[in-house]
């Protein structure tokens, strides 16, 4: 009974013929596998033109390294996918800027507050919270909503079911009380 070539065996034979520099075999190999390998490069690189260029480079590598494929150890498609995947990952790695020496990082100033400023900010926060505690709870929440959470006067008036001018009065009077408390 004659042996029937499977698609996998066909690809393995094409790779073997490419190792012998058979251009016709290379052309057929490209026609049969380029769509799958393009999918691999596109999925990794996420840029169509870059994936197309990478695919061409992958096939150059296949042409140059076809003699490295050993039939029977892995499927020929797996070997081709590995070449495409590794090449695409190399492109991603090349995109990353080279890391700077760690000593350079020591020269970068700390953007955070100094310990003295952090202590002062903490004391001011406690004082503001204490003064907010002297206000009616609804008015204190309205002040927090307007000046810390960014709600508009209209949104706060709707939330507390009061007319807009009443909300303005609440906030104005609350700020006056806060100012008096903070300056005391």
Image (tube, rainbow, N blue to C red):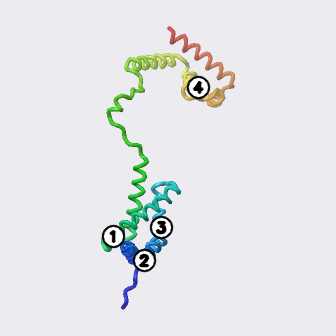
Which sits earlier in the primary sequence, circle 4 or circle 3?
3
* Rendered-image quadrant of the N terminus: bottom left
Which label is found at residue 67? 1
Q: Quadrant of residue 143?
A: top right
Q: Mark 4: which secondary structure?
A: helix
Which label is found at residue 34? 3
**How many C-alpha atoms fall within 10 Å of the one at disc 3: few (<14), some, or many (≥20)?**
some
Which label is found at residue 166? none
For marks 2 and 3, give the CA distance: 15 Å
Q: Quadrant of residue 85?
A: bottom left
For marks 2 and 4, give the CA distance: 69 Å
Query: Closest to the observer: 37 or 145?
Result: 37
**How many C-alpha atoms fall within 10 Å of the one at disc 4: few (<14), some, or many (≥20)?**
some
Please give the residue where the numbered disc 2 appears in the rendered image: 7
Q: Mark 2: which secondary structure?
A: helix
Q: Nearer the viewer, mark 1 or mark 3?
A: 1
Q: Nearer the viewer, mark 4 or mark 3?
A: 3
For marks 1 and 3, give the CA distance: 19 Å
Please give the residue where the numbered disc 4 appears in the rendered image: 146
Name above or below for residue 149 compared with residue 28.
above
């Amino acid at each position: 009974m004659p042996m029937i070539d499977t698609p996998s065996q066909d690809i393995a034979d094409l790779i073997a013929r490419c190792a012998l520099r058979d251009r016709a075999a290379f052309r057929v190999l490209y026609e049969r596998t380029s769509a799958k390998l393009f999918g691999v490069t596109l999925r990794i690189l996420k840029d169509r033109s870059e994936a197309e260029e990478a695919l061409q480079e992958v096939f150059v590598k296949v042409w140059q390294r076809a003699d490295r494929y050993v039939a029977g150890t892995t499927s020929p498609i797996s070997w081709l996918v590995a070449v495409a995947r590794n090449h695409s990952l190399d492109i991603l790695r090349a995109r990353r800027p080279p890391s700077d020496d760690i000593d350079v990082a020591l020269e970068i100033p700390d953007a955070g507050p100094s310990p003295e400023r952090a202590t002062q900010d903490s004391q001011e926060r406690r004082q503001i919270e204490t003064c907010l505690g002297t206000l009616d709870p609804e008015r204190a929440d309205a002040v927090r909503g307007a000046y810390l959470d960014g709600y508009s006067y209209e949104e706060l008036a709707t939330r507390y079911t009061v007319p807009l001018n009443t909300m303005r009065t609440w906030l104005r009077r609350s700020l006056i009380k806060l100012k008096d408390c903070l300056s005391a």
